[in-house]
Image (cartoon, rainbow, N blue to C red):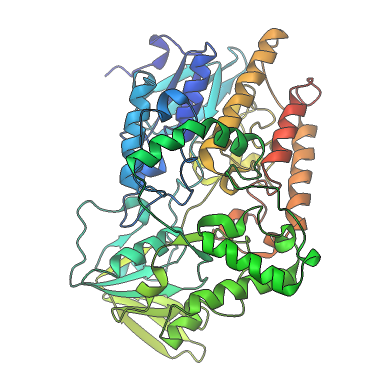
Amino acid sequence: MRVPVLTLLPEPDIVIVGAGFGGCVALHHLRQAGYSAKILDACDDFGGIWNMNRYPGARVDSEMPTYQLSDTEVRNGFNFAQRYPSSEEMRRYFSYMSAKLDLRKDTLFGQKVVEARYDEESKKWTLKTEQGLVAQSRFVVFASGTSNKAYIPDFKNKSAFKGPIIHPKLWPDNADFTGKKVGIIGQGSSGLQIVQELAKTDCELTVFIRTPPQALPMGQRDVSFEESEREKSYLTSIFNYAKYSSPAGQPFNADAIRSAGEDTPEQVLARWEALRDRKGFSFLSSLNYYDIYTDEELSKEAVRFLAEKNRARVKDAAKRDIVAPLQGQAPIGAIRPCLEQDYFEMIDRPNVKLVSLKTSHIVEFAENGIITADGEQQQTLHELDVVVSATGYDAVTGALYDMRFHDRHGQLLQDKWRDGIFSYLGVMVPDMPNAFVLYGPQAPTSLANGPPFLELEAEFLVRLLARAEADGRQSVEATDAAAKAWRARTLEVWRRGLASRSESWWVGANIPGKRREPQVWFGGLGPWRLACEDALKDWSNFV
């Protein structure tokens, strides 16, 4: 059988890997700039994580209207029905957006990239997929996202369990847990959302919690068609602010930035009450005190403030101490925060049992459940029919490494970064000419609102390529010195904050053997954007 070769289509200028927000934004912007481009994606449709995540309760926790493309052609014709859309609504949005921008004609689905190599002679990238496709192009853009490679720990005796072990990314169609005993390991965003939904059904939940979620009230509400239409009258202003003024791509005001030391304790408490009552991520925004992320005592006070609010919603004292302890929690902003709707009320239901993995640990799986042991090694069998392993992802770098991304010398990216991540601006890697990463390591990525940040990255990429073309450069490649300097700056910014003390996936701590380092840029959108502007001034940071 003849192997299909993308170069016969004819060969595009750019191959993009990924059809989530990053890939869609890149394709749209690059085509507008006059480049021919093709997307390769392993899934069967647009959406990225929103095409994959179909577990109960899956929804966005970035507040509308900024979790969408700012393009007026798209936003004027679609109306979100909720302030925080469900995954189903996001799939409807991607279907509409991709049709409006005519993205499907340049997208090949069902193509999982398993190798990418640069050829010095032809000055081209060659990508191979698991399905036998070979694609060549001058430029390549990797937009595989952060939460792509599912991680399920290698629990002892896991294979002995007779029931299904489900990761949220791989949720089975038409799953029915009625009358079943369901165990859920992990309470990050996905685990929290799943508990909220399954607790309402006729099943028995056993929730294994090591790190309690840093949960804030979502403030979910329906958005009427009339309100959505009115909002479109000033969306340009909102998006411009989110992209070019906000530290995180969110539309929160930044005019109240101050230190808690400038206010009395009563004023601090009043501010916290007001921000929490506004719901969403207001409490973690620039409306709060800037030193909440650097002052350990202030952070502890904020954590306790939130814990007391959440504890008031849990009647069971034992559950209260597991899910909202007053001590021992991570600092504010040191782990990925979650938004909840009725999580603490659902935890309190009689069909929900909590198991603390701080006072006990998982010993092994059994045929009919999970065995834990407490501090005195007293073992307990938790009988289960189903286990949900909401244990996250090998985030940020995992999907990149699986694509076997080689540099010009044939070295794999994971080998190149064995001693740490070295990138320039989180977008380029030395010895990888004309290759660009969107929503990747050492960029704001997971600490920024996705769509506005990705538009900034795409705008930077288009301007960089235009500058290269104007100056007659055939290749765009960051120097080792530029990558070393950006790494040093990334580490320095990270070490300033309390997040440097946490054991979160932001630093790779959830994956055994993974190097502990900041996988993302902790310095905010503003400094990152200014660094991109500096990069466009001359070619001093490029080969």
The number of numbered badges drawn on the structure is 0
Q: Is residue 450 left or right of residue 99?
A: right
Query: Residue 420: where, in percent of width, then height?
Result: 69, 47
Q: Is residue 529 above or below residue 489?
A: above
Quarter of the image for the N terminus: give it. top left
* Residue in front for this viewpoint, 365 or 325: 325
Q: Position of residue 66 (x, y in %)?
A: 50, 40
Can you give x and y, in whole percent of width and height, for residue 24 in the image?
45, 28
Report if residue 51 is visible in the image: no
| Residue 93 seen in the current view | yes
Question: Residue 10 falls in which quadrant of the image?
Answer: top left
Q: Is residue 507 left or right of residue 159?
A: right
Residue placed most toward the observer, 268 or 480: 268
- Residue at left 70%, top 74%? 266
Residue 130: quarter of image: top left
| Position of the C terminus by quadrant | top right
Pick the residue in front: 7 or 436.
436
Q: Residue at x 62, y 66 (%)?
A: 272
At x 62%, y 45%, the residue is: 248
Residue at horizontal 62 percent and vertical 60 percent from the top: 333
Q: Is residue 107 above or below residue 306?
A: above
Q: Is residue 36 above or below residue 130?
A: above
